[in-house]
Amino acid sequence: MPLCKRKKATIISATPAIPIALNVKSRICSVLMINLFYVFLGGALGSVARYLFLMGFTNNNLQKLPSYINYVLVVNIIGSFLIGIFYALLSKNNISAEAKDFLKFFVAVGFLGGLTTFSSLSMDMFILLQKGEFINTAIYIILSVSLGLTAVYAGYSIMK
């Protein structure tokens, strides 16, 4: 079943010669499609950015760091900081509705959703546990959550 069914447009007029509004449903469908496009494009770019970050991380001998510090942790901290900034921007009243939609769907949901991944974080923790690295797993969890929350707060505070 399609998200937006085509329906015969209805014209509401103040006078027979001046159309005032077309079918409201077609406006809702076009907004939905624009927002889906923002998420799609942002998500694709965020995923590519995450991949490029991984390539840079592994090519620069950073894999010699302790096993609980890896690119997923770093990307999640950066993403948390950026989402704090965008949350602060979204809460400002002087931003147009169109800009808020763009920031929300393209940047926050799309790009940062593609850049940061909780599923990758969870998989890393699982792998550490499978290797019997219980202390490193605990350190990784604590760092991910505490630094992520701190980064959101920092990004939000900078923009307030």
Image (cartoon, helix red, strand yellow):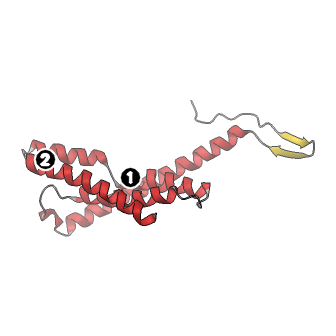
Give the x, y percent position of residue 24. 71, 39
On the question of residue 47 being in view, the answer is yes
Q: Which mark is residue 114?
A: 1
- CB under 8 Å between callouts 1 and 2? no
Give the x, y percent position of residue 99. 57, 58
Total marks drawn?
A: 2
Vertical relation: 100 (above or below) 13: below
Give the x, y percent position of residue 77. 30, 58
Amino acid on which the number 1 mark rests in the picture: Gly
122 on left or right of 135? right
Amino acid on which the number 2 mark rests in the picture: Leu
Name the residue rendered at 92%, 46% in the picture: 17
Q: Which mark is residue 11?
A: none
Name the residue rendered at 60%, 56% in the picture: 98
Circle 1 SS class: helix
Circle 2 SS class: helix
Per the model, the C-alpha gap separating discs 1 and 2 is: 23 Å
Badge 1 local density, few (<14 within 10 Å), some, or many (20+)?
A: many
Give the x, y percent position of residue 10. 79, 36
Vertical relation: 129 (above or below) 110: above
Q: Which residue in the protein does label 2 denote?
A: 128
